[in-house]
Image: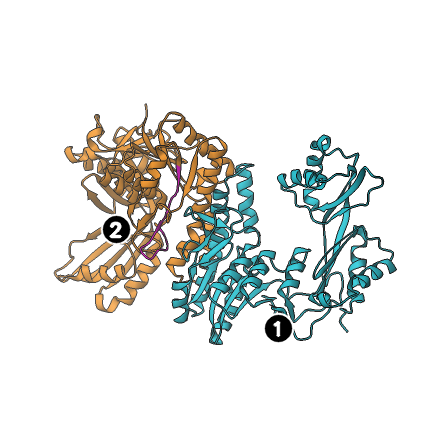
Chain colours: A cyan, B orange
Amino acid sequence: MARIVMKFGGTSVANVDRIRNVARRVKAEVDRGNEVAVVVSAMSGETDRLVGFCREAATLYDAREYDTVVATGEQVTTGLLAIVLQSMGVPARSWLGWQLPVRTNDAHGSARIQDIDTGEVISRMLTGQVAVVAGFQGLGPDNRVTTLGRGGSDTSAVALAAALKADRCDIYTDVDGVYTTDPRIVPKARKLDKITYEEMLELASVGAKVLQTRSVELAMKEKVRVQVLSSFEDLPGTLVVDEDEIVEQELIAGVAYSRNEAKITLVGVPDRPGVVAAIFSPLADANVNVDMIVQNIAHDTKTTDVTFTVTRTDLPRALDTLEKHRAELGYEGLVSDAAVSKVSVVGVGMKSHAGVAQTMFKALADRGINIQVISTSEIKISVLIAEDYTELAVRALHSAYGLDAA
Amino acid sequence: MARIVMKFGGTSVANVDRIRNVARRVKAEVDRGNEVAVVVSAMSGETDRLVGFCREAATLYDAREYDTVVATGEQVTTGLLAIVLQSMGVPARSWLGWQLPVRTNDAHGSARIQDIDTGEVISRMLTGQVAVVAGFQGLGPDNRVTTLGRGGSDTSAVALAAALKADRCDIYTDVDGVYTTDPRIVPKARKLDKITYEEMLELASVGAKVLQTRSVELAMKEKVRVQVLSSFEDLPGTLVVDEDEIVEQELIAGVAYSRNEAKITLVGVPDRPGVVAAIFSPLADANVNVDMIVQNIAHDTKTTDVTFTVTRTDLPRALDTLEKHRAELGYEGLVSDAAVSKVSVVGVGMKSHAGVAQTMFKALADRGINIQVISTSEIKISVLIAEDYTELAVRALHSAYGLDAA
């Protein structure tokens, strides 16, 4: 017997028929003798509809009211799933964020979970009742509804699994696991049986959309065993686990890419201490997130070029901010390019192996792909390249690291 | 300065544009220096959509889960109205049933309000903040969401007005007041400036759909001054008040009709004590509401005929129940007729005037309309007639009591 948290996303609960399919999966776990809590998202499209209402109501809206409106999507699916489970003879009840409660901080619209009161839920789970918990929502210190930000239901599920000391947190989604890369680009991509938290985190942050970054951080911190699997097929998924649980460590776990990138170069920036801080602080104030940064070697003794990337969505706001501060920053020219993409290789094996970067650079050079910017972490190397070369680069790297399926 | 509760139904908040219109009306009251609380329904069609989901999920569903699902409709409109009010510079916040809380009993799906905690709301209203309260919903003793039954938002508004000791409870709807009869049938129908609680209650119970019956009962009990008015036009509405507030009492306030009627006659029922109770107790068990009842004079010493009406919706269930109990009831025949309608005249003036019934019977007889069943209360006379004569009867009575506009 195990205690399991199962999480189903929007496409898995898109209508009542799909909710019935979810209920069958829940019943199967119950029939195996497991104690089960289920976390559900809103029906796919519903959150967009509700957000649309808020935007139509006002361009600037009170985040507390936004949360009140948007949290209803999950409230509907919890109630419906409880009804369907009961009709299949499985004892179940819905729990809203304020009912457990799932206590969060007061950052409405992007709240963080602080603690979950599970006393009542556990005592009911011990009697065989399935807890159907609304994802994405909580209760703020102001006694009002909070939401965790888009994709927050993954985080709800992991936090609940931690609070319940669950044996496993199964994240059901429309893909059947974590792949070595996007199978739409590389048909020979392989599904991974296991991946480490660190790798999953890096993959999530560089464009793989399987799990929300924050949920992986939380799983790592709380040592929650997460499994990613398909809600439509009955296949084993990918387990996200601690590094020492993986016996045969591969060098590289996966190749990820992101097209939501844009490059900005400030030409002829005065080369004096503090100038980089002077550039990035107005961008931070404008809520522009800066990712890769390169400061070129100065042409002469007085000026330098600074290149960095932002998301493509943020590019207009970034350019606008830099133009406004042109006088104080004193740069000579401003060049931007939105036709770029970021390709990354991720793997904990890199920590103990030399030559990983060299393999990447050589594979790209062999295909004539020019690297514009490089950034690295302990277990990740990312390069910025011209967008047209994205697929070619991903395929080349997938082969170069021996990830292609036999 | 007055304290006012304003209530807007589903058609008044059907989309964000209409919610903006509602907000303008609220702002106008605030600008007049009034303290305002607003009660809103779900967008029209939304409750039906949510109820549809529950029915699709299971034929028999847990009323607690139904309430969880269905209450989201009002949650969305409260949040949106608060956002729009704020964007117009009117301080406002939404209040859900569990937040005030609006405490109800545990009759999920048709709960009754027990008390409303208004301490926090009043202190905020005193600082000029508008309270936007979700209608139709409350918090049960089990700490779960309850709903009051269809049309329950009227009751929410009246209960809130009573708890706030409000000077007035304005019910905004798609008609501009209470009329002497349905203007679609009688173009000369007049809008009443005032009507008594008792009359409004009788009119609501015999087919006038302006206010939910329970909300009128509550207003009468708590002496809440209710006004019915249009949310689309800027016209005075109809005030529902105590009898002694009406100086020039008319004999008849209005003529109402209902087509949702059906007549059943049990022929040759053994004429012995207790037989009527024996007929109606299985119907009550089957949740069939019996309205008008006539026990005919016995043909002979041994048997009698019993005629009564039920709603047309309940007719198949009523017939089924009576067939099942045929042996124990021992009646000889069962006749039913769904092509009937009930026409009623209502007025507190009837209490002190003789001849009111006579005027009715004569007016109908003059048009050759046959009366099948009669039932009366202190301030109401209802007759059952063939459905085809409905409009003719309504017009005849409206004229006979001098209600036609000049």
The amino acid marked with disc number 1 is: Glu
The kind of residue on which mark 2 rests is Asp
Instruction: Using the image as rendered, state which of residue A406 and residue B210 is in the foreground.
Output: A406
- Identify the residue under disc 1: A245
Residues tagged by mark 1 and mark 2 found on one chain of the structure: no
Q: Position of residue A48 (x, y in %)?
A: 57, 48
Q: Is residue B57 visible?
A: no
Measure the alpha-carbon separation of dots 1 and 2: 73 Å
Q: What chain does badge 2 belong to? A: B
Q: The numbered mark 1 sits on a residue in which chain?
A: A
- Residue that appears at 65% across and 38% down: A282
A378 relative position to A166: left or right: right
Quarter of the image for residue A202 reads: bottom right
Q: Position of residue A65 (x, y in %)?
A: 47, 42
Q: Residues within 10 Å of mark 2 (few under 14, many from 20)?
A: few
What is the number of the mark on residue B291?
Answer: 2
Identify the residue shown where x is 15% and y is 54%. B297
User: Nearer the observer, disc 1 or disc 2?
Assistant: 1
Please indicate whether residue B256 sits to the left or right of residue B234 in the image.
left
Asked whether the viewer can see residue B110, the reply is yes
Residue at point 40%, 46% (across, down) = B96
**For the magenta stretch, what is the residue range?**
B131-147
